[in-house]
Image (cartoon, grey):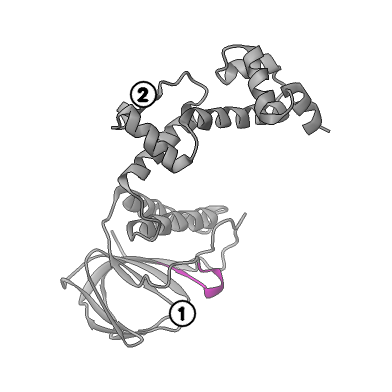
């Protein structure tokens, strides 16, 4: 890894879907300044350094962390570095008006350099030599936002969930991908480490409806989409969604929606 600094603030964006990055840097054996005045927002990852960690005073408050760590620097802050030495780091800066929302209580936090973080940084560094090419600035903006999301998730700046909630969400994801198939809920429960009875209890607590009703809702939502976004016959839609017969599909649709599939299609289309 070699030191690089690139300012892409004024490069044209094609779409500007992600917050535009002002600059990016990868610094090797970079000395810590004694003091630093911050402009904009800087998201800094420090990989390792000559000291065990870093100690810094931010507007009168003391912070410290071992390597590797994440450091969020904000507009107008004054940083006094008490201990640092040399460090290898990567950082992204944003202008204040373009800065993504980061929890105010996040200043310094030790992190694990996961494969996802390494992959995003590697992709960013690969694109830097082409930063002036069309669309590259957009890609850099998007990759930096993905990197920030990974970093915030690592810091626990999202909802804390129980093990059961996490497992129920995994099962929900599975059903989202397989709702058109014939489903054996007892077998699914065992695959995810539940007895059938325990699964149904935890599922009901989380979703408020039985898993069969959850799957029925997924099928009906997909049926509505296919009725309005495709020309598939009603019978073909029923087969695609796993209904045993066209008659049962029409019955189930009418029971939950209040009209037949054909009536729904005619009412939805101009």
Separation (CA) of disc 2 from disc 1: 55 Å
| Residue at x 16%, y 73% (from the top left corner) | 51
Residue that carries the numbered disc 2 in the rendered image:
186
Q: Quadrant of residue 112?
A: bottom left
Seen from the viewer's position, the closer of residues 123 and 107 is 107
Above or below, 260 relative to 92:
above
The answer to whether any part of residue 256 appears in the image is: yes
- Dots 2, 1 in contact, CB < 8 A: no
Q: Is residue 269 left or right of residue 238?
A: right
Q: Is residue 48 left or right of residue 227?
A: left
| Front residue of 244 and 154 | 244
Task: From the top left corner, tell me how far across and down residue 192 is, in percent.
Answer: 32, 32
Work out whether mark 2 precedes mark 1 in sequence or the reverse, and give the earlier one.
Answer: 1
Q: Quadrant of the N terminus?
A: bottom left
Magenta-colored span: 92-99
User: Is the C terminus in the top left, top right, bottom left or bottom right quadrant?
Assistant: top right
Residue 200 lies within the magenta run: no
In the rendering, at what x and y percent does residue 109 appear?
29, 67
Residue matched to label 1: 75
Q: Residue at x 58, y 18 (%)?
A: 240
Q: Is residue 209 above or below residue 223?
A: below
Which x, y percent locates residue 6?
Answer: 44, 66
Q: Secondary structure at mark 1?
A: loop
């Amino acid at each position: 890894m070699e030191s690089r600094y690139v300012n892409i603030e004024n490069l044209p964006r094609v779409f500007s879907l992600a917050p535009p990055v002002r600059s990016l840097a990868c610094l090797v054996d970079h000395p810590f300044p004694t003091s630093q005045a911050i402009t904009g927002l800087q998201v800094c990852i420090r990989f390792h350094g000559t000291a065990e960690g870093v100690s810094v005073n931010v507007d009168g408050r003391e912070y410290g962390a071992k390597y590797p760590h994440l450091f969020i620097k904000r507009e107008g802050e004054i940083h006094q570095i008490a201990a640092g030495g040399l460090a290898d780091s990567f950082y992204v800066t944003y202008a204040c008006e373009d800065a993504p929302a980061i929890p105010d209580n996040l200043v310094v936090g030790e992190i694990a350099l996961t494969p996802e973080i390494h992959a995003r940084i590697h992709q960013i560094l690969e694109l830097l030599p082409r930063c002036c090419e069309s669309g590259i600035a957009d890609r850099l903006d998007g990759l930096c936002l993905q990197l920030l999301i990974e970093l915030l998730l690592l810091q626990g700046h999202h909802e804390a969930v129980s093990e059961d909630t996490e497992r129920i969400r995994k099962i929900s994801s599975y059903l989202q991908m397989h709702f058109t198939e014939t489903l054996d809920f007892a077998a699914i429960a065992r695959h995810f480490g539940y007895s059938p009875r325990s699964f149904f209890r935890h599922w009901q607590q989380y979703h408020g409806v039985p898993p069969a009703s959850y799957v029925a809702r997924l099928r009906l939502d997909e049926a509505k989409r296919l009725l309005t976004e495709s020309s598939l016959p009603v019978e073909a839609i029923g087969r695609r969604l796993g209904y045993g017969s066209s008659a049962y599909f029409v019955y189930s649709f009418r029971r939950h929606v209040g009209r037949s599939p054909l009536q729904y299609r005619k009412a939805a289309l101009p």
